[in-house]
Image (spheres, rainbow, N blue to C red):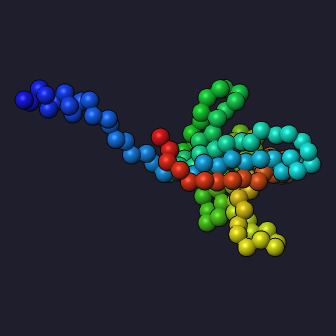
Amino acid sequence: MLRILMIILLLLPTISNADQGLNISCLNMKSVFGRNYEPLKFTLQAVGLQYFDEENDEFVMIKASKLDIGENQITARFADYELGFQLIVFEGDSEPTMTMSKYDYKNDKFLEHYKCDAKSGYIE
């Protein structure tokens, strides 16, 4: 009887609980002028910010302790630039819009601006 119970327990599907996170997709704002850009995709979790590094063909996680997190912004710093995600209420809008800016802190100038969509979801 114990063997049968063990086999049944082994064959039952495992229920896993995933962590909740934020799936973020950002499109370069220059796309409104007709240029085609691939969206940049990020996942914000309690442990950090994950993105796909196309140069190294791998997912990279920036630990939460390495992020600058404020009330309405999150900044991730890289060797030559930083990515700043912020919530902004544009004139005429009542709801905030998530944007991302690529900032060259060595030369003190913004390089690119992105409009982002964020959806909460479960991250496995």
| 124 sits left or right of 116 in the view | left
| 114 sits left or right of 65 in the view | right
Q: How many marks?
A: 0
- Residue at left offset 39%, top offset 46%: 17
Answer above or below: position of 60 versus 84.
Answer: above
**Residue farthest toward the left in the current orientation of the protein:** 1
- Residue at left offset 74%, top offset 42%: 39
Where does the image place residue 109, in percent across and percent down from the top left?
A: 85, 51
- Is residue 42 in view? yes
Q: Quadrant of residue 11?
A: top left
Where does the image place residue 59, in percent across and percent down from the top left?
A: 59, 33
| Quadrant the N terminus occupies | top left
- Is residue 84 in view? no
Where does the image place residue 55, in percent across and percent down from the top left?
A: 71, 27
In this rendered view, identify the residue nearer to me: 22 or 77.
Answer: 22
Answer above or below: position of 22 versus 51.
Answer: below
- Residue at left offset 69%, top offset 53%: 117
**Residue farthest toward the right in the current orientation of the protein:** 33
Where does the image place residue 92, in percent across and percent down from the top left?
A: 81, 73
